Image (tube, grey):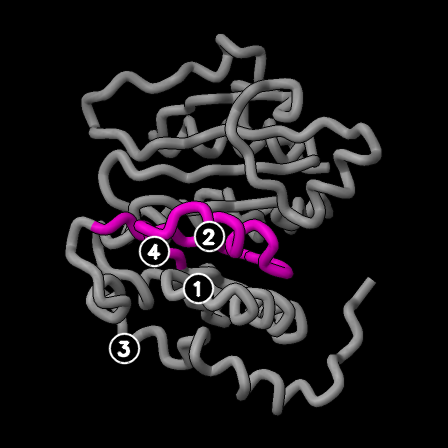
Amino acid sequence: MRMRKKKNLTGRMEACEDVQVLNPEELRGKWREHFGCDAGTVLNVEIGCGKGGFIVQMAKQNPDQLFVAVERVESVLLIAMEKAQKEQLDNLLFISYDASRLDLVFDKDEADRIYLNFSDPWPPKGQHKRRLTHPAFLTVYQRFLKERGEICFKTDNRPLFEHSICYFSQFGYGLFEVTFNLHATDTPNVMTEYERNFSLQGLPIYRLVARKMFPDTPMTDVRKIGMLDREEEEA
């Protein structure tokens, strides 16, 4: 269901100007400097932050790290920014931007970690290239994620998870912490709003960490963990 337009959206968006970057291209290669931090500070990027429950908690729990949240839908972005403002966080900023162009926002090796949480699975035939884990997007992430940088991926959609494992593996990422039932493990976890609802329904959550590896590093063979080892099948 499409979210209704928020009342006084323009005014409320303007009130969040201290946590939103309107021209993020100008900060390409300068994010740590903009935050007032040194070059070694960890920079995390969440693509599709939704209402901000995850990224706000992560920023609170990791005050020594930096966070940039990306969300295209203004009415959703507003909720996330207002949450951040209430917490008075100085290590979290928001941008409204297309994920396919994020290499214009972040410079080579600038990001340490990318979070993809409950992204749209895009199941219709011919729409798979819109998935945020598809090689079309991995090509973009490759340009700004540092060597051995990580993409942390969570979803409730098993077909998307299986295909994403193939995408990551075929693109040369090492796969770690692969689980088909996250909440049955002791892995530290900050839940999103969607995840909390799924958990209450008893639905399994799928998670993995994909690491950008050096070219001569052996990669995970997806067949060893019983996953797809062929090109995705168009539904």
The Cα–Cα distance between marks 3 and 4, rounded to whole angstroms, is: 18 Å
Quarter holding residue 73: bottom right
Q: Is residue 127 left or right of residue 21?
A: right
In percent of width and height, residue 14 lies at 53, 88
* Residue hosting label 1: 89
The Cα–Cα distance between marks 1 and 4, rounded to whole angstroms, is: 10 Å
Q: Is residue 197 left or right of residue 175?
A: right
Residue 101 visible from this viewpoint: no
* Discs 3/2, front: 2
Above or below, 226 against 81 in this view is above
Q: Looking at numbered disc 1 in the image, what kind of residue is underneath it?
A: Leu
* Discs 3/4, front: 4
Q: Secondary structure at mark 4?
A: strand
Above or below, 228 against 106 in this view is above
Query: Closer to the camera, 103 or 21?
Result: 21
The Cα–Cα distance between marks 2 and 4, rounded to whole angstroms, is: 10 Å
What number is the disc on residue 60? 2
Q: Looking at numbered disc 2 in the image, what kind of residue is underneath it?
A: Lys
Above or below, 114 against 82 in this view is above
Q: Quadrant of the N terminus?
A: bottom right
* Residue hosting label 3: 26
Q: Residues within 10 Å of mark 2 (few under 14, many from 20)?
A: some
Q: Quadrant of the C terminus?
A: top right
Mark 3 or 2 closer to N-term?
3
* Residue hosting label 4: 66
* Discs 1/4, front: 1
Dot 2 and dot 4 residues touching (CB under 8 Å) = no
What residue do we see at 75% from left, 79% from top?
5
What residue do we see at 40% from left, 76% from top?
21
The Cα–Cα distance between marks 2 and 1, rounded to whole angstroms, is: 7 Å
